[in-house]
Amino acid sequence: MIENDEALRAVEGSIDRPSAARIYDYFIGGHTNYAIDREFAEKVRARLPLMGDYCLTSRQFLGRAVRQCVRAGIRQFIDIGSGLPTAGNVHEVADEERPEHDVNVLYTDNEPVALAHSRILLDETADPERHEAVAADLLQPEELWDRVMDSDVIDVREPVALIVNAVLHFIKDDQDPDAILSFYRDRVAPGSLLVLSQMTNENPVDDDERQALADLLEYYESTTNPGVLRTMAEFSRFFGGWPLLEPGLVYAPAWHPDRNTVFAKAPSESRVIGGVARKPSL
């Protein structure tokens, strides 16, 4: 069991540069962020005033995707790059959707502070027989999958929902995300669902927005997580040709919107794309 002082030790040496996870936390109204993160976030907001809403869009997409996965019969989730816990964590959404409380969740992240806070959250609010947080890096798939296999909460022989939400825009093409996603797709059972989203530079409304998105990437070069934006065509390959659930790969607010969805009336303004695909049966 990780105590609060261990979480504090986990951030030592990690606050000399802004952290993408903590910036995201700040933008969606969380409290696990520091002055260096808030200063950076406000610099971004000055250039892209809707950046907070883009981050909220990603978080809302995650919640709606979890609900749809549960409704589709999925009872176990692997959240890769889960980040800092905040409102609407996967296990909380799943348990709201399934009052039977029979859904298992494994969180993975490579940032010590994210892992530490996730474990604190799980110690306080979760069921240790169904929920677990482990240290693992999306970019080291064999090691990550070993952690999944060693987990007490995931049975890889059964379908899972594999979530990579708001992470792939921090994975550049020279880091070979194609091979990494292929590795994970190969290892999940038939009937599994793949939940993916990222920020896009698809169809900027004008030259100013095009330049603002380019500036965003330049800003993030100074953080612990430099980034890349992709069009829908560039992003769609990560689903590996699996059939997409309706409505396909779309701007995230157009994916099963509910009454709380930001940008619901103008999804393309969200700068976030996402979709869910199912692994075909053998």
Image (cartoon, rainbow, N blue to C red):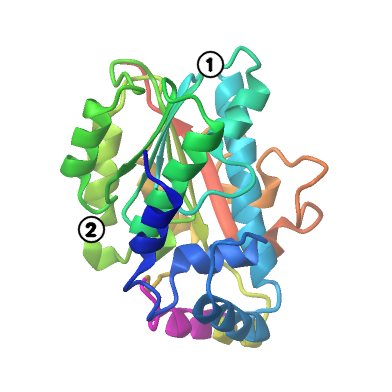
Q: Secondary structure at mark 1?
A: loop
x and y, in percent, of residue 5 in the image = 41, 56
| Quadrant housing the C terminus | top left
**Rendered position, 171 above or below 151:** below
Q: How would you rate the neighbour count of disc 1 (Cα within 10 Å): few for under 14, some for 14-19, many for 20 or more? A: some
* Dot placed on the residue nearer the N-terminal end, 1 or 2: 1
| Quadrant housing the N terminus | top left
* Nearer the observer, 79 or 259: 79
Q: Which residue is mark 2?
A: 176
- Residue extending farthest top: 100
At 66% across and 86% down in the image, what residue appears?
46
Q: Quadrant of residue 67?
A: top right
Q: Quadrant of residue 49?
A: bottom right
Q: Report the amino acid beneath label 1.
A: Gly
Where are the magenta residues, as a range? Answer: 213-224
Q: Report the amino acid beneath label 2.
A: Asp
Q: Is residue 219 magenta?
A: yes
Q: Which residue is mark 1?
A: 73
x and y, in percent, of residue 39 in the image = 57, 83
Q: Is residue 144 magenta?
A: no
